[in-house]
Image (tube, rainbow, N blue to C red):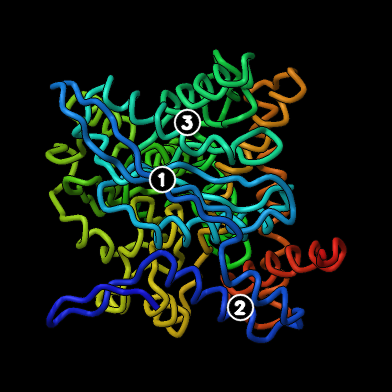
């Protein structure tokens, strides 16, 4: 197990640690072929690249990146590309494993992948970011293709970055290949509804869970940790569509809290003008860590990994947690919350709306036939509610957590694919 530790502090979990832990916990009581069990513990393919990029000041800097295929037995590799200053191979491998389960649990014909570059996109100019993206694409291009590996946006990347990847790949091929990436602008083959897909999927599964546990979302107190593309969509839908009281939100700079609820429309306008929710006059200031423990019925971690740990899990007051981010709970926190009876919808199910609409985008690109946003949203709701119903039923029948049920469902689908395809040679 790979961890980093500072004196007097608990060891920090890597994404690979977390993914491996949840996998081992779920597969322990499953009747899975030993060879398949071992295969799924390790990434199937890892590409490590180092490449030079000319910066705006004329200097040349070396960057390190990766593309990892965890498993492709069920279809082409699918997973985002992350730009983050502290990114490591262990992070990428863990996220790739999670993508294998994420695509399987919602029934998409994909395998799991992830990629990224260790860099801080906020400290790079537009031109530097484009040069890094295009050079990184050239380095990993042996793995890419609509039938092989289809990247998408992740933390630190966006529609613009996906357009650069598509263009670079297309220039190498000599013709336009829009299906090589998803999450790109609509004008170059992107799908309507992709930007809000992850947040919408989170709300769809929350509605299903609330109905089953007897929680009325109208008037329910909700805290959303993270107010980016996903968190702001969740907050807007809960406030404007379902009538929930969004009592707290935060971003990377800090948070804002009001026990009677925040005006999310005003807050969105305020952030658009100032760049942050900090200082919003409609509530009182609260730090990002404090926001996780405010009185609420529903907590939606929608920022980064490992924000709920063994150090604060016992102070979380929410009745329900929906993991809009990847791995916002450490395994230790997950155990504490499970013992306390808090219902947790795991990331591999809760935030699968993004990859689901990425699948729709890929299909549309291959067919050159595009859907309306209403059609996309309707199909997204169908996929997410069906997957949640299956996971909830399995959890109830086996008396296990929603996370264990989701992992078992995903693992069983991947294992079945292995059994049907066989081992070669």
Q: Tag 2's secondary structure?
A: helix
Q: Name the residue: 53% across, 63% down.
A: 345
Q: 114 or 67, which is in the foreground?
A: 67
Residue marked by disc 2:
26
Q: Residue 11 placed where, x, y %?
A: 26, 77
In the rendered structure, the answer to whether residue 68 lies left or right of residue 386 reads: left
Q: Residue 291 placed where, x, y %?
A: 24, 58
Which label sits on residue 138?
3
Q: Tag 1's secondary structure?
A: strand
In 3D space, how far apart are the residues under numbered discs 1 and 3 (Cα atoms)? 10 Å
In the rendered structure, the answer to whether residue 409 lies left or right of residue 61 reads: right
Q: Name the residue: 37% across, 48% down.
A: 245
Q: Earlier in the sequence, mark 1 or mark 3?
A: 1
Q: Earlier in the sequence, mark 2 or mark 3?
A: 2
**In this rendering, is residue 13 above or below 263?**
below
Q: 268 or 275, which is in the foreground?
A: 275
Residue marked by disc 1:
49
In the rendered structure, the answer to whether residue 301 lies left or right of residue 295 reads: right
Q: Name the residue: 60% across, 45% down.
A: 78
In 3D space, how far apart are the residues under numbered discs 2 and 3 (Cα atoms)? 38 Å
């Amino acid at each position: 197990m790979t961890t980093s530790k500072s004196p007097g502090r608990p060891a920090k979990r890597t994404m690979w640690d977390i993914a491996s832990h949840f996998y081992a916990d779920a597969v322990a009581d499953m009747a899975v072929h030993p060879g398949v069990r071992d295969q799924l513990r390790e990434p199937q393919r890892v590409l490590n690249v180092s490449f030079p990029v000319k910066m705006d000041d004329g200097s040349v800097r070396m960057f390190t990146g990766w593309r990892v295929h965890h498993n492709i037995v069920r279809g082409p590799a699918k997973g985002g590309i992350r730009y983050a200053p502290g990114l490591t191979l262990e992070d990428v491998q863990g996220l790739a494993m999670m993508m294998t389960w994420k695509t399987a649990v919602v029934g998409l014909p994909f395998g799991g992948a992830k990629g990224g570059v260790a860099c801080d996109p906020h400290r790079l100019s537009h031109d530097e970011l484009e040069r890094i993206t295009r050079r990184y694409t050239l380095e990993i291009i042996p793995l890419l293709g609509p039938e092989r590996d289809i990247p998408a946006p992740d933390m630190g990347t966006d529609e613009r970055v996906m357009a650069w990847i598509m263009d670079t790949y297309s220039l190498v091929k000599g013709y336009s290949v829009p299906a090589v990436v998803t999450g790109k602008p609509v004008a170059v083959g992107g799908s309507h509804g992709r930007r809000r897909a992850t947040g919408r999927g989170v709300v769809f599964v929350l509605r299903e869970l609330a109905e089953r546990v007897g929680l009325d979302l109208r008037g329910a107190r909700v805290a959303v940790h993270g107010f980016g593309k996903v968190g702001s969509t969740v907050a807007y839908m809960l406030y404007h569509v379902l009538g929930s009281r969004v009592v707290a939100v935060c971003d990377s700079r800090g948070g804002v809290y009001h026990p009677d609820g925040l005006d999310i429309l005003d807050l969105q306008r305020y952030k658009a003008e100032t760049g942050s929710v900090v200082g919003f006059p409609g509530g009182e200031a609260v730090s990002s860590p404090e926001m996780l423990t405010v009185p609420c019925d529903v907590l939606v971690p929608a920022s980064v990994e490992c924000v709920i740990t063994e150090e604060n899990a016992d102070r979380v007051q929410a009745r329900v947690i929906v993991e809009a981010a990847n791995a916002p709970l450490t395994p230790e926190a997950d155990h504490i919350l499970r013992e306390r009876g808090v219902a947790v919808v795991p990331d591999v199910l809760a935030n699968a709306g993004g990859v689901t609409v990425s699948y729709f985008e890929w299909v549309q690109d291959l067919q050159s036939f595009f859907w309306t946003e209403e059609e996309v949203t309707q199909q997204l709701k169908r996929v997410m509610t069906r997957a949640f119903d299956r996971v909830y039923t399995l959890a109830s029948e086996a008396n296990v957590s929603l996370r264990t049920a989701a992992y078992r469902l995903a693992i069983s689908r991947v294992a079945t694919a292995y059994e049907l395809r066989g081992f070669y040679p």
